[in-house]
Image (cartoon, grey):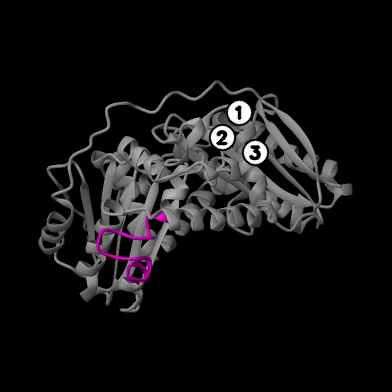
Amino acid sequence: MEIFTHTLPNGIRIIHHPTKSPVGYCGLIINTGSRDEKDDEHGMAHFIEHVIFKGTKKRKTYHILSRIDDVGGELNAYTAKEETCIYASFLKQDFERALELLHDITFNSTFPAKEIEKEKEVIIDEINSYKDNPSDLIIDDFEELVFKDDPMGRNILGTPETLEKFGRTDIERFMANNYHTDQMVLCSVGEILPSRLFKLASKYFGAVAANLRVNNRPSIIPYTPRRVDKEMDTFQSHIAIGNVAYDLNSSLRPGLLLLNNILGGPGMNSRLNMSLREKNGIAYNIESIYSPYSGTGVFSIYFGTDEENINRSLNIVYRELKKLREKSLGKLQLHNAQRQLKGQITISSENRESLMLSIGKSYLLYNRVDSLEEIYQKIDNITSADLLAIANEIFDESRLSYLIYRQS
């Protein structure tokens, strides 16, 4: 994969992958998220993602939203535990329009008081709608259980109580303390010459004052397994099981990614899907999730089932975990699992918006982007012995936490 990079004097990094396409993509990824909030800032990173679109020194909300929409493009954003991203898709002739807008809303937002108050209500509605989706809510609640009393465990949206206290000064202070220019990557995929892109990036982002990170994120509070049952007003019961896992820089991360894919990845032939759904017909939604972070990670299994099938389902899950702890994959099983994961990654790379975000995040975290061939090699280097050792560490039953939403 052809990649071009450049770093501005203020530390903002730029990465570009040229393609032959009438559509271009660009985004600004910032290495800050809900994990970086203080106790009284819970929900601030996500709140900023909302209010950053509500007015700049030269644009009102309508003009911000229309700037890309008027030419048939899309403007979007997301907030995660450790990053915030603002990004756009557009026709290739509108690269400058998109870059200028990204700069304007990130560095020139004025956060009008009226818009701040209005957006609080919008996010409270978002929080309430989230509570109506227990399959999503339980994953957040499970991470809160795993990372108890640590900022990593808090949900991204915040609470109505914390949101109510936010004002313009609080927003500006959080951005000054967390929007570090050496922790920003401007990523791009599209048909534009690298020299032209770097010139435009310098024009709009080059004058931003340097604001370099001086402190690392604090260490995570040590993990203690916890098991919680809750009664919930739901149509079925929801279960999450898991453990802390390897961080972003662990050499064991590729092995756990492969093991996770075997156990409960998106393939219909995953072991959990075959055992819970296909063979026994006692669950519809089943997945396992591995999320690596800076200095930590979390592995979880989620499924929904009827109340009377909880114990039976748990026994099946524990049996599948035991198999992976006690029995090595055969040569053909390992080959097929590696091939499946490589295929999924390759197909995903064809989505150019996802590719833009992927190379941007990789450059943000590792200051490099692996080619597909390098990714394939890492997957092919994983052995059955590696997977057995990982399974015995991560799937150790004595180390597993669980959270159950039982039908009330």
The residue under label 1 is which amino acid type? Lys
Disc 1/disc 3 C-alpha distance (Å): 10 Å
Q: Quadrant of residue 51?
A: bottom left
Cα separation between marks 3 and 2: 8 Å
Q: In the picture provided, is 54 more to the left or to the right than 333?
A: left
Q: Which mark is residue 153?
A: 2
| Quadrant (top left, top right, bottom left, bottom right) of the N terminus | bottom left
Q: Nearer the viewer, mark 3 or mark 2?
A: 2
**Type of amino acid at the residue the image marks with label 2:** Gly
Residue at image position (33%, 46%) is 30
**Residue matched to label 3:** 142
For the record, the magenta segment spans: 51-65
Query: Alpha carbon of mark 1 to alpha carbon of mark 2: how far?
Result: 6 Å
State whether residue 1 appears in this view: no
Q: Secondary structure at mark 1?
A: loop
Task: Identify the residue under disc 1.
Answer: 148
Q: CB atoms at circles 1 and 2 under 8 Å apart?
A: yes
Sequence-wise first label, 1 or 3 = 3
Is residue 57 a member of the stretch shown in magenta?
yes
Callout 3: SS: helix
Q: Nearer the viewer, residue 42 or 200?
A: 42
